Amino acid sequence: MLSRCRGFSLYELLITLGLAAVLLTLGVPSFAVIAAKNTQDAEINALFHAVHQARKESIMRRKVASLCPTTDGRSCRRGKDWSTGWILFNNIDGDSPPAVDEGETILLWHRVAESARISANRQSFTLRATLRRATNGTLVVCDRAGRTPPKALVVSYTGRPRVALEAPDGSPYSCPDYVKQTTQ
């Protein structure tokens, strides 16, 4: 009795590997775009949540709440680049520009993903319950590799945030180091 070895021929293996290579070549770049969009959305959502929490804190406790960029999670960093992270804290003395002083509670500390870039037109955002309006402004979130178009979180004078894809004049937002990749 003869036994037959069952398996794949060299031709079948080469065709299978070729198809797998084509599918991976098509799928990996689109996966990178999806991952970049998810990272960008996560950063926008974190900022959106922080502005809402600052607004709630200022209204409920009738205290000033400030949001500012940070590198260490304990103090505000001067500048309009928020790419290293940001903190939200109760700004009891209401100083401007805001600084975390002794006795002021840090409510949130967020580190920004390495692949994201956040720039703002303000050094900080301060929300107040009464008397004076909140700080308005725009935070633009970009992918450092330019795989997704920039998105912005626009904060109104009342402290209400909204997500925008275009500036008020209809032009798209841009980041200082945003490099648009062309697809062919």
Image (tube, grey):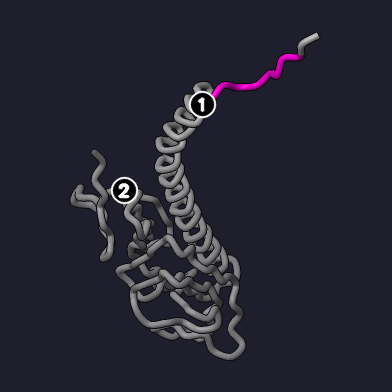
Q: Indicate the secondary structure of the residue bearing disc 1.
A: helix
Viewer-side residue, 129 vs 135: 135
Can residue 4 be seen from the camera position used here? yes
Q: Which range of residues does the magenta coloring cover?
A: 3-10
Q: Is residue 157 above or below residue 39?
A: below
> Type of residue at label 1?
Thr
Tag 2: Cα neighbours inside 10 Å, few (<14), some, or many (≥20)? some
Q: Nearer the viewer, mark 2 or mark 1?
A: 1
- Determine which quarter of the picture holds residue 25: top left
The crowding category of the residue bearing disc 1, from other C-alpha atoms within 10 Å (few below 14, some 14 to 19, many at least 20), is few
- The residue that mark 2 highlights is 165
Work out whether residue 30 or residue 177 is closer to the camera in this orientation and state it: 30
Q: Is residue 118 above or below residue 79?
A: above
Q: Indicate whether 97 appears above or below 125.
A: below
How far across and how far down the image is residue 64, in percent?
50, 75
Prevailing secondary structure of the magenta residues: loop
Q: Is residue 49 left or right of residue 119?
A: right
Residue located at (53% from left, 72% from top): 88
- Residue 134 lies in the magenta stretch: no
Q: Is residue 5 magenta?
A: yes
Give the image location of residue 146, x and y in percent: 32, 54
Residue flagged by tag 2: what amino acid is it? Answer: Leu
Q: Say how many tags the image has.
A: 2
Of the residues under marks 2 and 1, which one precedes in the sequence?
1
On the image, the x and y values in percent for residue 85 come to 48, 71
